[in-house]
Image: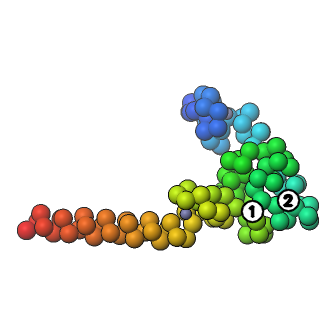
Amino acid sequence: MQSGQLTNCIRCGRLFLKDHSDSCLDCYLEIEHDFKCVAEFLEIDQNRYATIEQVSEGTNVSVKQISEFLRDGLIFSEDYPNLGYGCSHCGKLIKRQLLCNECFVQFSTDVSRTLTKEKLLEEIQSK
Ligand SMILES: [Zn+2]
Ligand SMILES: [Zn+2]
């Protein structure tokens, strides 16, 4: 018999035997329940234009949890015009990934700038 690995639940931090998920069974069931509430709420026609705050109010599921559903693609934010979560950098409403376009572009330029700088430094040092 194969024994699982003890890990901290990503949600409540409690130690649990890691099986198929990153959260303990209690949290797993809670998340599943939350997901069902959100999915049911969004199935109602008039909720199609709800914002994440309205969904949270209507379902008692935290905004953070709903953002996770969106980020994980469990809920297709593309289907809901006003549904999205904050860009990790500027907080602007986005529907996928972690950053909005502007921050993504900004971030990529920063990265390439840093890379160029590092490359330059390397070249200088290798001389
Ligand atoms: Zn847990
Ligand atoms: Zn942003």
Of 23 and 125, which appears nearest the observer? 125
Crowding at dot 2, Cα within 10 Å, few <14 / some 14-19 / many 20+, comes out as: many
Residue under label 1, please give it. Answer: 83
User: Mark 2 near ligand 2 (CB under 8 Å)?
Assistant: no
Query: Left or right: 52 with respect to 87?
Result: right
Going 72% across and 36% down the picture, which residue do you hit? 27
Residue under label 2, please give it. Answer: 42
Q: Are circles 2 and 1 on residues that touch, CB within 8 Å?
A: yes
**Quarter in which the N terminus is drawn:** top right
Going 63% across and 57% down the picture, which residue do you hit? 86
Going 75% across and 56% down the picture, which residue do you hit? 52
* Vertical arrangement, residue 112 with respect to residue 66, above or below: below
Q: Is residue 76 visible?
A: no
Q: Residue furthest left?
A: 127
In percent of width and height, residue 89 lies at 52, 57
Of 72 and 7, which appears nearest the observer? 72
Q: Residue type at mark 2?
A: Leu
Q: Earlier in the sequence, mark 2 or mark 1?
A: 2
Going 82% across and 61% down the picture, which residue do you hit? 50
Q: Residue furthest top?
A: 15
